[in-house]
Amino acid sequence: MPKMKTRRSAAKRFKLTGSGKVKRNKAYFSHILTKKSPKRKRNLGQRGIVAAADESRIKKMIQS
């Protein structure tokens, strides 16, 4: 049986924390930043944690 391949698109978007949770980047931080408040932009720049409902699916995609 062949080895499982990592989905490269998912591997570039998600990383695992030390405790096994999945980190992600937040959306809406790439353009049209002039109308967003500094507080909102500051919070968008920080990493978020993937929801528990999606976590197992993403872990399967990024396993190598």
Image (cartoon, grey):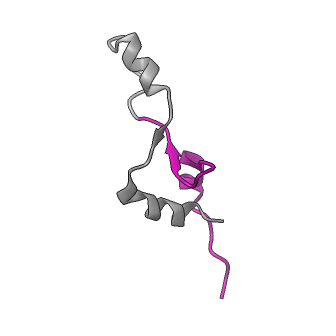
Residue 31 coordinates in the image, percent (x, y): 42, 23
Residue 48 coordinates in the image, percent (x, y): 46, 38
The residue sitting at the bottom extreme is 1
Residue found 43% across the figure and 23% down from its top: 43
Q: How many marks?
A: 0
Residue 36 coordinates in the image, percent (x, y): 34, 15
Q: Is residue 3 above or below residue 1?
A: above
The residue sitting at the left extreme is 35
**Is the C terminus in the top left, top right, bottom left or bottom right quadrant?**
bottom right
Quadrant in the picture for residue 5 = bottom right
Foreground residue, 7 or 64? 64
Residue found 50% across the figure and 29% down from its top: 46
Q: Is residue 24 above or below residue 52?
A: above
Determine if residue 32 is in view: no
Residue found 65% across the figure and 88% down from its top: 1
Q: Is residue 10 magenta?
A: yes
Determine if residue 47 is in view: yes
Residue found 40% across the figure and 11% down from its top: 38
Position of 30 with respect to 63 (left or right) is left
Residue 15 coordinates in the image, percent (x, y): 59, 48
Q: Is residue 34 above or below residue 8?
A: above
- Magenta segment range? 1-26
Q: Is residue 23 magenta?
A: yes
